[in-house]
Each structure stands twice: as C-alpha cells, then as structure tokens.
Image (spheres, rainbow, N blue to C red):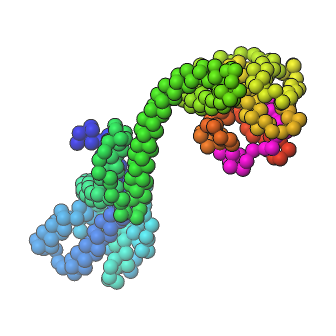
Amino acid sequence: MSPNFISRLSGKLLILTIVFVLIAEAVIFFPSAATFRKDWLRERAESASHLALALTGVPESYNRNMLADEFMDDTGISVVTTEIEGQSQLVLGTPPDITEFEIIDLRGGASGLDLPGTLAAFSAKEGYFRVLADPPSGEFDSLEYLIPKAALQQAMERYCHNILGLSILIAIMTGVLLYSVLAFLIIRPIRKLAHDVAEFHKDPTASEQASAPSRRRDEIGDLERSFVDMKDGVKTSFEQRRRLADLGLAVSKINHDLRNVLTSAQLVSDRLAMDKDARVAKMGERLVRAVDRGVRIASDVLEYGQDGDEDIRLEPLSLRDIADEAAKDTLAAFKTVAFDNQIDRQISVKADADHTYRILQNIMRNAGQALANTPHAKITLSSRADQGLAFAMISDNGPGLPEKAKANLFTPFAGSSGRGRTGLGLTISKELAQSQGGDLNLVDSSESGTRFEVRFNQV
C-alpha cells in the first residue's frame, strides 16, 4: 500500500473501516471470552458427570483406569468427586498435596459473566481451580472437580488467538466490501468531480463538450448538477466579459479619435458663431452646442473606463472651500441658477481633493441642467456631522427626476434623464465616493426638488 494511496480519501476510508471493526471486536472480546470460559468449564463438568455415572459401580480394573486416564488427558481435569446423600466420593484422580484452591461456582444456573476472573485466567498458571457444578442428571447431589489453572490459561490463549485471527479477517473483508461499495457510490464520482474542477480551474474558457446533468438523486448528484450549472454560468460570463472587453476597447478607440475630431470641429464652430452674418452665427451656435454634447459624451465614456486605475490621496480638506470651488467652475455656465453654500466651515473631511471636486461638480452640473427652465432656480449645499462621519447635502428646487431615471440612477448608460447624456456622471461620482471610504445616495426627488447626500470620513 503506497503512501500516496494512504493519503487519499479512499485509502483513509479503507484503513478507518478496518480500525473501527477491530475496535468493535475488541469491545465485545471480553464478554465473549467470559462466555467461552464459563462454557468451557461447564462442558468439563458435564463430561465429568457422565464419566462418574459410567464408572459408578464398576470395579477397579485396567479398563477403568485407562478410561479415566484418557478422560483426564482430554479434559485436563485432575480430580472428580461427587456427593450423594451428604457423602463425598472420589470418582477419579488423586487429590494434590495443596489444600488451597480458587473456587469457581457454576451452581444454580448463574448467568453472570465473571470479567475479573476472565482477565485473571490469561495469566494464572500455578495452582488449581476447584469447580462446583450441578450434575446434569439426578444421580448425584453435587459435582466438583479440580483442573489446573494452566489448562484454562492455555484454552483461553487458543481462544484469543482464534478470535484475533477471525477479527482481522472480518475487519479486512468488511473494509474491502465497504470500500468497494463506497468507492463506486462516492469515491469514484468525487474523484471525477475533483478532476473536472481541476481542469476547469486550469482553463475556465476551454471549449469542451458540455457535461450531461447527473441523474443521481442524492447529495453527490446535487453537487454534480450544481457544478455543471456553475461551469456553464462561468463560461457564459467569461464569453460576455470577453465580448464586452472587445466592445469597450473599440468604443474607447472610437471615442478617443472622435474627441480629437470634435475638438477640431469645435474650433471651426466657434469661428462660425462669431461670424458677422446673423444666419451664419446662429448656425454656428447650434453647431457649438452639438459639438459640446459630443465632446461631453466622449469624455464621460473615457472617464468611466479610466476611473478604476486612479491613485487616491486622502488628506484633510475643508468641505466648504472645495464646494465653493466646484460651484464656481460648474455654475458659471448656468447664469440663471442661484447658489447658496451653507456648509459648516468647521467641518473637515479626509478625502481626495480631485475626487471630491469631481463628485460635487457632477451633481451640481446635473442640477444646473435640470433647472434650466425653472423660475427662481437655486442649488443649496448644507452639511451635518455624526459619529465621525460628515455629510454634504446638495439640494435643488427643480422638477425632480423621472421614475425611470431614479430606478437606474447609478447604472452605467441607463441613468440618463435627458438627450445627449450618457448617464455616467452619477455612476462615476458614486464610485469615486466609495473609493475614498464614503458613498453617494439619492435622498429624495419629487416635484419640489431633488436632494443628494455625499458621505465622507471626518478628520
């Protein structure tokens, strides 16, 4: 048996089965040995009783002595005595010179097992046992015989050797049979499943014939079916990711080239917008707006694809100051929108300056676009601090977000609420907030306005 086999589940199962059977045999050995000891002594008592009946009334003769000697050699009994009407009679043998004997009483049909006496029988070699027994017939009142302790000890040793050999044979046969059954039902399917898992781990995208679902209705069958489902799902996911990666790479290349083209077109449209001819200038302004939308879309897509690789530098920042900076740069394009910064000057957050600027800029730009046709349009920033966290609330009095936009607000390319928008601004902002240990959430959006909340870690 190789070490490699022993280290495997099948080898461990076989060895443990053999060990457990041997342990069970060891547990029942001592009761069985005690039963063997009692039966062995009773068999000799029965044989002695029959011999005593045969020898009663038979005169001394050569045949009688020969029969007694053969009986004593076969049974190991040294002396047999009987008692009739209170008188003891020596049937055969000569009492030894010693007067102290260890008494074993088998009378009265005692059914208990003498475990201490059984253990002592394995080591007792000197002296005699005086065995008291009930005769099988009514010819005698009682029967007793002397037997050397060595005879019982030899019989117990032979029994022990026989039981040990039989136990080992039973353990090996049970282990092999149980191993064969479990190897077919459990080990072989698990080994095959482990091989499939290892092969799948090496190359999840390998194009091989799909495994047929298992027909088993037990736990192994459930595991096999679950693995097949998982493997098919992972392969599908890898295929989708590969296609998306290829598509993303193509889109990034297109957007990069498109942004360069649109930048050139923007320069031309700016010149047309400044033309002295009113009609040309008007067309130029429309072209400027169209080009701006194209540039913004291309920039958002490229920005979304690059956010995961940016380094984060967390440092103490004044939340009010960075909000003022973002509002000044963003709301300059929205002349009709008022701005009120109510953020507490004492609040300092631990964040990345560029990330925080972009978060607030995206939210305020979206708010400014939503407030384009709102009278008395206003964006308000407020703050609160709670248990080591700082919160910046950006509120507006616009018409609120559509239900479709709210349902997919932070889903890439799905959260847009207007034409010419990608829906990436809030997705990027949420990722930026989470990357520095915070978060971005929509608190409320109704006909009376919209409010976002940005969470930061307070210094």
Is the N terminus in the top left, top right, bottom left or bottom right quadrant?
A: top left
For residue 2, which quarter of the picture?
top left
Q: Residue at x 83, y 47 (%)?
A: 447
Report the front residue among 159 and 304.
304
Q: Is residue 148 left or right of residue 409?
A: left
The correct choice, above or below, for 239 with respect to 184 in the image is: above
Magenta segment: does it hold 319?
no
For residue 266, which quarter of the picture?
top right
Residue 213 percent location from the top left of the image: 36, 59
Q: Residue at x 64, y 23 (%)?
A: 272
Res 301 seen here:
yes
Magenta segment: does it hold 395?
yes
Q: Residue at x 65, y 17 (%)?
A: 313
Residue 61 percent location from the top left of the image: 13, 73
Question: Magenta segment range?
Answer: 391-408
Residue 296 percent location from the top left of the image: 62, 29
Res 99 seen here:
no
Which residue appears farthest toward the front when viewing the image? Answer: 277
The correct choice, above or below, for 354 with respect to 381 in the image is: above
Is the C terminus in the top left, top right, bottom left or bottom right quadrant?
A: top right
Report the front residue among 186 and 302.
302
Q: Residue at x 82, y 35 (%)?
A: 395
Q: Is residue 24 left or right of residue 315?
A: left
Residue 168 percent location from the top left of the image: 27, 53
Q: Is residue 153 left or right of residue 346?
A: left
For residue 223, which quarter of the picture?
bottom left
